[in-house]
Image: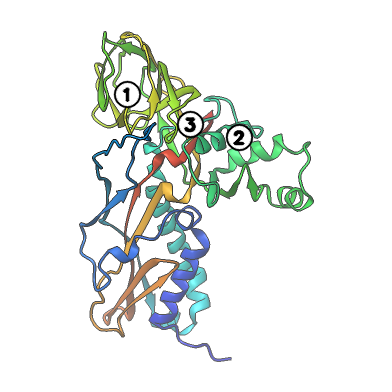
């Protein structure tokens, strides 16, 4: 039986199919900003200011108290280009797309997707809320239940939530719940495939590319006779022998989380995340500390100027970080790369909002067709308070 010679259209469609099958984090986050980037050939460095909802306070009584509205936004940049490069001989092209897919396209695209999702999952370091016990493997629903509560406490919508765990975390949850009541379809899935499909109001996904938190060599200090003020993003600290690493999560004794709308104390210490550029005496805080006003994100009445600062986990230890999140916590975008060298040699295809370009050129000396597959993308934690990390046993 004669095989159909694989064409560039076939290769592009097969590449998109593998990408769609392999990605698990990207399809579950906000993809609505793709149309904001150039669709007639995006340029590296294109950026978009994403406006956040305005925050106000509620008055009591008849008298008006008109408030100034402060526009808040984050910048989403589409500037990362990754790709894989292949070569096919004339003989291989003649064997058809099935042969090329099994031997070349599928392995290459799985590798490309892994690197892209690894990049996107690095947004975990922008999430302050954390659930689970550092150093203790997840073995029941407690970490997921607490993460759900923290999302609820930050007024995250109760729909479109997802949970990303690696295989070790998933195995612990499955084993821990094997003796509990579950509906028959969940039990069947867990026993046959080794995972649950949905728990704690979130759809579960297994993903080995989850981010790893690298703790520094010291995880405890105090404020250095320092008074926290509204809008603080740089705390003066003492007692640290090593600078905190970006992404480390910490609490300040006496500073509690509050509901973003009612401003009521939620009863547990507010978690913060260290920003880049920290030192042993300066602790930079992602998102800033607001103790009053429309942006208030904590209750810090009467906090000691020498309050203890405690980081999650042990010193010089790595922790794998799963995630529970609402889709609008994060955004991922792709932009259309320009078509080069004519449509017969360069094809672009968009599926599920992901734009992928395949570009080919002949090598007549070696009777080969050189093929490159490229994606131009960007990502941003837009509302990180609508996400919560899931921590367990220390990583090797």
Image position, residue 209 (x, y; %): 47, 46
Q: Which mark is residue 244?
A: 1
Image position, residue 249 (x, y; %): 40, 27
Q: CA distance from mark 3 to mark 2?
A: 12 Å
| SS assignment at label 2 | helix
Task: Please tell me which residue lies in front, 177 or 328.
Answer: 328
3 or 1: tag closer to the N-terminus:
3
Disc 3 vs disc 2: Cβ atoms closer than 8 Å?
no
Image position, residue 326 (x, y; %): 48, 47
3 or 2: tag closer to the N-terminus:
3
| SS assignment at label 1 | loop
The residue lying at 27 percent from left, 32 percent from top is 276
| SS assignment at label 3 | strand
Instruction: Report the residue marked by disc 2.
Output: 145
The residue lying at 52 percent from left, 38 percent from top is 152
Which callout, 2 or 1, points to the residue nearer the camera? 2
Q: Is residue 252 left or right of residue 40?
A: right
Image position, residue 149 (x, y; %): 55, 34
The quadrant of the picture occupied by the N terminus is bottom right
Q: CA distance from mark 3 to mark 1?
A: 17 Å
């Amino acid at each position: 039986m004669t095989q159909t010679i694989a064409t560039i259209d076939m290769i592009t469609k097969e590449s998109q199919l593998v990408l769609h099958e392999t990605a698990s984090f990207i399809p579950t986050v906000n993809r609505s900003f793709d149309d904001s980037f150039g669709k007639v050939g995006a340029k590296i460095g294109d950026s978009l200011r994403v406006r956040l909802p305005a925050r106000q306070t509620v008055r009591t009584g008849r008298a008006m108290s008109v408030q100034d509205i402060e526009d808040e936004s984050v910048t989403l940049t589409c500037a990362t280009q990754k790709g894989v490069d292949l070569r096919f001989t004339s003989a291989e092209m003649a064997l058809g797309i099935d042969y090329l897919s099994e031997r070349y396209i599928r392995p290459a695209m799985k590798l490309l997707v892994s690197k892209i999702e690894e990049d996107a999952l690095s947004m975990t370091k922008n999430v302050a809320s954390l659930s689970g016990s550092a150093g203790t493997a997840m073995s029941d629903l407690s970490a997921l239940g607490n993460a759900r509560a923290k999302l609820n406490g930050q007024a995250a919508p109760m729909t479109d939530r997802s949970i990303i765990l690696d295989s070790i975390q998933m195995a612990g949850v499955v084993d821990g719940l094997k003796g509990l009541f579950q509906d028959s379809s969940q039990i069947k899935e867990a026993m046959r495939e080794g995972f649950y499909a949905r728990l704690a109001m979130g759809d579960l996904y297994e993903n080995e590319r989850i981010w790893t938190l690298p703790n520094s060599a010291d995880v405890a200090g105090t404020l250095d006779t320092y008074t926290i003020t509204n809008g603080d993003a740089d705390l003066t600290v003492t007692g640290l022998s090593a600078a905190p690493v970006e992404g480390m999560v910490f609490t300040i004794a006496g500073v509690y989380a509050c509901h973003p709308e009612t401003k009521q104390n939620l009863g547990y210490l507010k978690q913060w995340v260290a920003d880049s550029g920290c030192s042993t005496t300066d602790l930079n805080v992602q998102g800033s500390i607001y103790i009053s006003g429309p942006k208030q994100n904590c209750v810090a009445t009467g906090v000691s100027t020498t309050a203890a600062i405690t980081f999650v986990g042990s010193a010089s230890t790595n922790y794998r970080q799963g995630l529970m999140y609402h889709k609008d916590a994060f955004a991922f975008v792709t932009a259309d790369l320009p078509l080069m060298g004519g449509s017969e040699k360069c094809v672009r295809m968009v599926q599920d909002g992901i734009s992928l370009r395949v570009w080919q050129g002949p090598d007549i000396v070696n009777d080969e067709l050189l093929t490159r597959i490229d994606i131009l993308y960007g990502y941003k934690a837009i509302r990180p308070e609508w996400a919560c990390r899931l921590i367990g046993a220390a990583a090797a």
